Image (cartoon, rainbow, N blue to C red):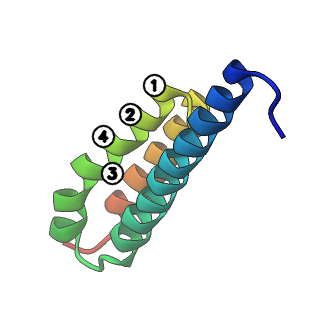
Amino acid sequence: MANHKSAEKRIRQNSKRRLANRYFGKTTRNLIRDFRAADKQADAQKALPKVVSLLDKLAKRGNIHKNKASNLKSKLMRRIAGLKK
């Protein structure tokens, strides 16, 4: 149990941030899953900007490391290159 006002506030902030982080993490995983499920190159290229944008935002905020975002983007680009037109 928190004994100070600042500790109570910190608990509230942490719970809000945890929920936001969980939301963005789950949203990112779902977008990447849907992207990988695309079987045509045109469909994948249509979904790519949204996925890349979200990964960049998460890296900027510190939710994921910038190198992880870069690695994921690289894998997604290679996936597009390997798909049928």
| Tag shown at residue 60 | 1
Numbered disc 1: secondary structure: helix
| Tag shown at residue 41 | none
Cα separation, mark 4 vs mark 1, equals 11 Å
Dot 2 and dot 1 residues touching (CB under 8 Å):
yes
| Tag 4 residue | 53
Q: Nearer the viewer, residue 65 or 42?
A: 65
| Quadrant location of the N terminus in the rendered image | top right
Closer to viewer: mark 3 or mark 2 = 2
Dot 3 and dot 2 residues touching (CB under 8 Å):
no
Q: Amino acid at mark 1?
A: Lys
Dot 2 and dot 4 residues touching (CB under 8 Å):
yes
Closer to viewer: mark 3 or mark 1 = 1
Dot 3 and dot 1 residues touching (CB under 8 Å):
no
Residue in view at x 23 percent, y 76 percent: 40
| Tag shown at residue 51 | 3
- In this view, 65 is above or below 21: above
Check disc 1: other Cα within 10 Å, few if <14, some if 14-19, many if 20+: few
Cα separation, mark 2 vs mark 1, equals 5 Å
